Image (tube, rainbow, N blue to C red):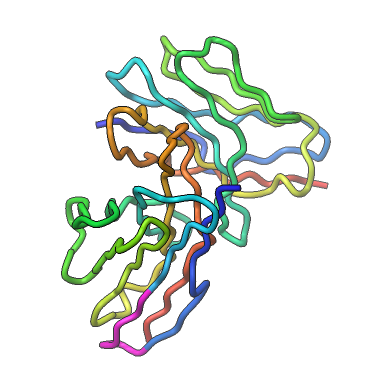
């Protein structure tokens, strides 16, 4: 079974600075999806960024980018120019390819990010 | 597009009663829905997978008689917590997979259940 590990329970960053959240995963599959979700106090799950394993290029979404190292099974999230609204719980998640069936998301334990004004 | 609506967003009930939570896909057909449970300050734990028109598949340790899941149509799945007890108090979130699965799953807003 696949597992996702987030080794940083809490992180903090100064407003306008850059922070990197770590995520590693374990899988024997060669094709899969990786995601970062943000969960603010409202607890709504918000997709931040996604990465397909077959793509070598790192995904970017505005201030959010990932460093995807497939061989190392590492998928870190970098938040640039941090804003107060970025404060939330961040979950790294893994999903097996859709063609393999009804595959759910497997989540890490999360990293709570605080942004200091 | 790809909106999932969950209702109610929060509910308080007495111990021993049953509570139903609905998860609807508003603008797409959800062939599969996943139900997660989240305790305070913890991650999301998969409870069960439901496919339209068939019985749900429960994760190990999840009581299928306690958490009844029905996926009667391509736009609606329900989770019924039967004979609820205080230890069932939690945050329940559904997510849906569309027919044209592109990898992403779509989440409802979640339902906070408090059992007194």
Q: How many marks?
A: 0
Instruction: Name above or below for residue B75 compared with residue A52.
Output: below
Residue B19 forms part of the magenta stretch: yes
Residue B76 falls left or right of residue A57: left
Name the quadrant containing residue B71. bottom left
Where residue A40 appears, as percent x and y from the top left, is 62, 54
Which residue is at 35% across, 52% downward? B34
Residue A12 falls left or right of residue A102: right
Where residue B55 appears, as percent x and y from the top left, is 19, 57
Where residue B38 appears, as percent x and y from the top left, is 41, 58
Residue A48 forms part of the magenta stretch: no
A64 or A24: nearer the viewer: A64
Where residue B88 appears, as percent x and y from the top left, is 32, 72
Which residue is at 77% across, 46% downward? A116
Instruction: Name above or below for residue A57 compared with residue A60.
Output: above
Instruction: Name above or below for residue A62 compared with residue A45.
Output: above
Name the quadrant containing residue B56. bottom left
Which residue is at 33% across, 68% downward? B79
A13 or A61: nearer the viewer: A61
Q: Which residues are magenta?
A: B14-20
Residue A61 falls left or right of residue B18: right
Task: Report the quarter where the C terminus of chain B lies.
Answer: bottom left
B40 or B44: nearer the viewer: B44
Name the quadrant containing residue B85. bottom left
Which residue is at 52% across, 72% downward? B9
Q: Mostly what secondary structure, the magenta segment?
A: loop
């Amino acid at each position: 079974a696949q597992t996702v590990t987030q080794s940083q329970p809490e992180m903090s960053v100064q407003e306008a600075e850059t922070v990197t959240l770590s995520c590693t995963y374990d899988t024997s599959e060669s094709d899969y999806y990786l995601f970062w979700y943000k969960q603010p106090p409202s607890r709504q799950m918000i997709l931040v960024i996604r990465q397909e394993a077959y793509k070598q290029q790192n995904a970017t979404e505005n201030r959010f980018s990932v460093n995807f190292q497939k061989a190392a099974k590492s998928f870190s999230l970098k938040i640039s120019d941090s804003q107060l609204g970025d404060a939330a719980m961040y979950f790294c998640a893994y999903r097996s390819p859709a063609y393999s069936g009804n595959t759910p998301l497997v989540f890490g334990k999360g990293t709570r990010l605080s942004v200091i004004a | 597009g790809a909106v999932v609506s969950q209702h109610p967003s929060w509910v308080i009930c007495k111990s021993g009663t049953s509570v139903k939570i609905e998860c609807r896909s508003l603008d797409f057909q959800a062939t599969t829905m996943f139900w997660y449970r989240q305790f305070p300050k913890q991650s999301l734990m998969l409870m069960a997978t439901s496919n339209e028109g068939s019985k749900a598949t429960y994760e190990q340790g999840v009581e299928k008689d306690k958490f009844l899941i029905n996926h009667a149509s391509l736009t609606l799945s329900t989770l019924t917590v039967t004979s609820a007890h205080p230890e069932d108090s939690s945050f329940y979130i559904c997510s849906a997979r569309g027919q044209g699965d592109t990898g992403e799953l779509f989440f409802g807003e979640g339902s906070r259940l408090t059992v007194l």
